[in-house]
Amino acid sequence: MRTFLLILFSCSLIFSLDLPLDRTAILLDKGQKEIGICHPYRLGKTNDVEYSIHPILGFLIPNFKVKGKLLSAKNSINSYSLQFTYPTPLLKLVQKEGIGGLITPNTAEVSIPHIIVSRLQILSTRSIKENHLFTISAGMEFAIGFGEIDSRITIDLPYFFPRMNMYNSDFTLVTGMHFTGPLWKNIGYDSGGEFKYNVGSEQNISFEWGDYLFWQFKPKMKLLLGYNIYYAEYPFGNQWDLIPTVDLRYSW
Amino acid sequence: MKKISLLFFIFFISCNSLVTTFEDIEPAVKYSANNVSQLADSTKSNITVMTWNIRFGAGRIDWFGDHCGDRVLLTESEIKSNLDQIIDKLNDPDINVDILLLQEIDVDSKRSAYIDQVQYILDNTHLNYGVFASMWQAQVIPSDGLGRVNTGNAILSRWKLDEPERVQLDLMTDQDALTQYFYLRRNILKAKVEIPEIEPFYVVNTHLTAFATDSTKKKHVEKYISTLDEILPNKFISGGDLNSLPPIVSGDSIPDFCIKDKCVGETFHNETDGGPHKSGSYFEYDEFENDWLQPLYDNYTPAIPLSQLYNDTLHFTHSPGTSLDLDRKLDYLFTNMNSMESESQTMQQIKEISDHVPILLILDLSSSEPAPMLNNNKNLFLRENIK
């Protein structure tokens, strides 16, 4: 463990490069913070616990994630994350007539009850080669609806559907992997994805993978450029999508 | 702000286009039944052609988009129930349709439970082959919860359909760019029917604009007529939902459909003021609008001649929404082949399965001579006796 952290520390000294660690098992240090445009606000509460929340989205879709350290092995760091999301206000916002209506405004067709989504995940990160990190993860997602949820509630688009399909599933199994490391000077890569299997749904499988190059152009700022690939079984059939993504992150 | 958000949304999903656009002319989508019957190899001298706007299998359910309803997403059982009624009619031995022109048929729409209605009808009738041209295809319509949509025109046939072609019609210009981007892209669908031992002929199906307040409908009618003219001297059967009233007698008046069709809380023009009008229910944006179809009656044989439309409500084909009181004719069939006019029908008895009723025409293929041109039957149609 100490060796591993030493490698990580020396890596950051040599390359002056902070790897994006949000999808790894590594936690922020106490008092350390990070935020991005498409990225939640993360706070190192203690050296063993990290909180994160999407501050702007939080008004529309209240959410909270806690990540905590687990017993680590010689060559790996392990942690858990537990996330709660309350999507009901956002769903009600887009259940409307006219432009912006993504869910039928007819409440006899689709009524939106209170829904709480929870996600529990175990992550394990180890160093591969020198300065490069590899993470595997596994977990489960549950959605608890306080009322009947019509299957037509879903927005049948990439990114949205795999997250909403679970409202009508018993539970979702999630497994993922992630790689990050330096490439050249203050440029690195951040690559990873998740496979989901919905149990108790007509559409079982979804998959997301994102590849980014990041440029740490200031000690505390990173620009990420890349794309996400989405595949899912939708009610109309299976579909692949590729969506370009840009993000700016600031840490302090 | 809403528009900026939507533009951002479009960019966000830009790598897999949100809306499908089309070339001016491109191949249509081909279909065939899961089990092609032997009838596909047989020949007939008299064939029955039907045109029917089936309203995506919504029946008379009060769907929000075309009348006063509040329904948006119908259930699979609702759609299948209506489709099965359509199929029962198509399988009726007394009707025995050989070639079917369908409008508003969904193949991949959330509003109709994602049922591929072309395939569903082919698989459950004696019809074997189909071609489809989309008039509205989008991953999402971000309005009113419509979601994904793919709807359009189809031609189904007992016999093989060759050279399927989708001809793009002009887009409406009385909309802002964002609305136009997500709006309908209407078309003319054309295919050649290959009947054994019979000279091939064309089938042309269309669904013209209903809601344009500019010159779009005129352009659509002109394009439709020119498409038929270009087929000459070959033979064709053509029709669809032209969203236009038949030619009218000078001095006669068109009923005030704006008032007839208005929903609770809506107000439109009265007899003295000039507007506003209810789009889709007003047929006089252009003072010559009711002459636009005249060339079709002048040059081709209609399923229902103007002389039969005279002083008669028996050939009205449409009433909006839940109303079963058919009150206007919007659907037509024309041909330059010999037809058995006495056998042609406006099937008003089938008015609960869609907001349009089908029209039937029997073609006589035993004669190779095209039908004589009709005389100009203008001024025979009166609509004073609308119920």
Image (cartoon, rainbow, N blue to C red):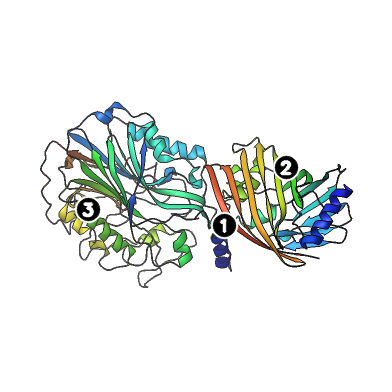
Locate residue B207, reporting x and y percent. 33, 52
Locate residue A38, reporting x and y percent. 68, 60
The part of the image, by quadrant, that contains residue B1 is bottom right
Residue mark closest to the camera, 2 vs 3? 2
Q: Which amino acid, mark 3?
A: Leu
Secondary structure at numbered mark 3: helix
Q: Which amino acid, mark 2?
A: Glu
Mark 1, other Cα within 10 Å: few <14 / some 14–19 / many ≥20: many
Q: Where is B183 relative to A169, above or below?
A: below
- Residue at image location 55% in from the left, 58% down from the top: A97
Can you identify the residue that label 1 sits on? A101
Question: As drawn, is B54 to the left or to the right of A247?
Answer: left
- Quadrant into which the C terminus of chain A falls: bottom right
Chain of residue at mark 3: B
Q: Which amino acid, mark 1?
A: Gly
- Spatial CA distance of label 1 from label 2 is 27 Å
Asked whether residue B188 appears in the rendered view, the answer is yes
Return the residue nearer the eye: B155 or A127: A127
Return the residue nearer the eye: A31 or A135: A135
Secondary structure at numbered mark 1: loop
Label disc, if present, on residue B228 of the rendered structure: 3
Mark 2, other Cα within 10 Å: few <14 / some 14–19 / many ≥20: many
To the question of a shared chain for discs 1 and 2, the answer is yes
